[in-house]
Image (cartoon, helix red, strand yellow):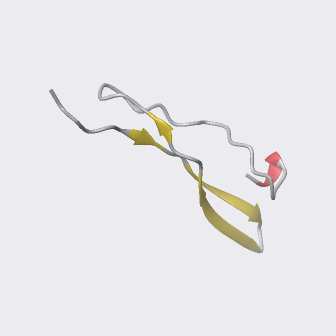
Amino acid sequence: MGLSTEYCSTMYVAGSRDSLSWRVTEPVRGSHEACKPFFAVKDDDFPSAQV
């Protein structure tokens, strides 16, 4: 019996072609069997076309 808890986050790039930055989503609780990343993220600083 393990006592650890697994969390998952998604790394993504956002910004314009001239200024891109790496970002990470808030961690969500996963399970020991699998981590399911987000394939679409909402970024408050950039529209979806720049994520």
10 sits left or right of 50 in the view = left
Residue 42 at x, y percent in the picture? 74, 44
Nearer to us in this view, 27 or 51: 27
* Residue with the most extreme bottom position: 18
Q: How many marks?
A: 0
1 sits left or right of 31 in the view = left
- Residue visible at 80% across and 46% down in the picture: 48
Residue 20, compared with residue 47, is above or below; it is below
8 sits left or right of 34 in the view = right
* Residue with the most extreme front position: 3
Of the 4 image quadrants, the one containing the N terminus is top left
Residue 22, compared with residue 48, is above or below; it is below
- Residue visible at 50% across and 45% down in the picture: 9
21 sits left or right of 18 in the view = left
Residue 41 at x, y percent in the picture? 68, 42
Residue 17 at x, y percent in the picture? 77, 68
Nearer to us in this view, 17 or 28: 28
When asked about the image quadrant of residue 39, the answer is top right
- Residue visible at 74% across and 73% down in the picture: 19
- Residue visible at 26% across and 39% down in the picture: 4
